[in-house]
Amino acid sequence: MAKVKTIAVMTGGGDCPGLNAVIRAVTKTAIAQYGIKVWGIEDGFLGIIENRIRPLGYREVSNILETGGTILGSNNTTNPSKYPHTNKAGKVEFKDLTASCVRTLKQKKIDALVCIGGDGTMTSAEKLAERGMTIIGVPKTIDNDLWGTEVTFGFDTAVTTATEAIDKLRTTASAHHRIMVLEVMGRYAGWIALHAGVAGGADVILIPEIPYSLDKVCDFIKQRNSWGKTYTIICVAEGAKEIGGEMVVRRTVAYSPETIRLGGIANKLAGQIEMSLGLETRSVTLGYVQRGGRPTAHDRVLATSFGHAALELVVSGKKNRLVVWKNNQVSSVPLAQVAGKVRKVPVNSPLIAAARGVNTCFGD
């Protein structure tokens, strides 16, 4: 096995708390334990395309463990295998720059690339692996929807933020006897809504995995009123939808690996409930607040463990693997098994059963 002399690290997709902890762990482990040179790629795959790659040392990664975001920047609209450019006729064409990206990395004598990201990042990374680049993936997403791992860093911080929002909304809902609908992120999976909803004691939790009936949600609210409950808290995932209905799309981004941007279900649902019941209803979309801020202790520990494990995979000669958390320990799975897959909440989840046990409504 050839000795690894140089690696690169990049963050792709949306930002989330804990990214800097991974960068720190990869860089410090590489330098201190193995004498490996580390490059940092700016703004995800766009940084490879534009050759914006800079050295990382102890100074660059000091005092970043507790900082949200990423010191390298990120990008969730660049797909190296489908990169847009305008031709002489003024029309947009697409180029496959995968081979060019690999050449850029090889010119820097980079032996392996540590990709920190979610399913979109891993799908693009797999394309680089097919061209001969050694890839080690680190699962990052607040949505917790990456296949192969039981948890991703960033998720715990996002759930904590959403739970605090529910706690704060409860006081207003109680004071004004309102129905409050809180929309949280999660894309096509309901992990954030489920965990924050349970932690915050939401009365109704709506997730993509369980299409809901508006009538049943309204009947539940009326039942609560008959019990003397003068307000209701609803936690809804952005990808939730009515039975036989469609998800609410906020906008589309034509050239992004993930073209659909969900959002607006809370506002829609609040209007429907107010019209149906005649009760004052308000909606709140938590949005990007969930991605920001200082990572929780849990996410700092998990991110550090993942970063260290990624570097250990590199020096042991492993190729094209994703670091995962499975059976209460760090492990890895083939990258090809992860690309393009989404991990959803099982409808028979024990947490759903526990929520139903305390009379939480899922609208089904």
Image (cartoon, rainbow, N blue to C red):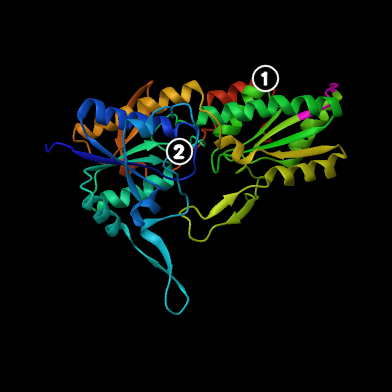
What residue is drawn where x is 74% and y is 43%? 269
Q: Magenta segment, which residues?
A: 227-232
Q: Quadrant of the N terminus?
A: top left
Q: Is residue 127 left or right of residue 111?
A: right
Q: Amino acid at mark 1?
A: Val
Q: Is residue 335 magenta?
A: no
CA gap between label 1 and label 2 equals 39 Å
Q: Specify the principal SS of the magenta part.
A: loop
| Residue 335 in which image quadrant | top left
Quarter of the view holding residue 157 = top right
**Position of the C terminus by quadrant:** top right
For image coordinates 31% across by 28% down, the residue present is 28
Residue 123: horizontal and vertical position, in percent? 37, 48
Q: Residues within 10 Å of mark 1 (few under 14, many from 20)?
A: few
Horizontally, residue 350 falls left or right of residue 33, namely right
Q: Residue at x 74, y 36 (%)?
A: 216
Considering only vertical position in the picture, is 304 above or below 314?
above
Q: Nearer the viewer, mark 1 or mark 2?
A: 2
Q: Position of residue 239 (x, y in %)?
A: 60, 44
Total marks placed:
2
Badge 1 or badge 2: first in the primary sequence: 2
Q: Position of residue 137 (x, y in %)?
A: 34, 39
Residue 70 circle label: 2
Where is mark 1, residue-wise? Answer: 358
- The residue type indicated by label 2 comes to Thr
Circles 1 and 2: CB atoms closer than 8 Å: no
Quick one: SS at disc 1?
loop
Picture quadrant of residue 152: top left
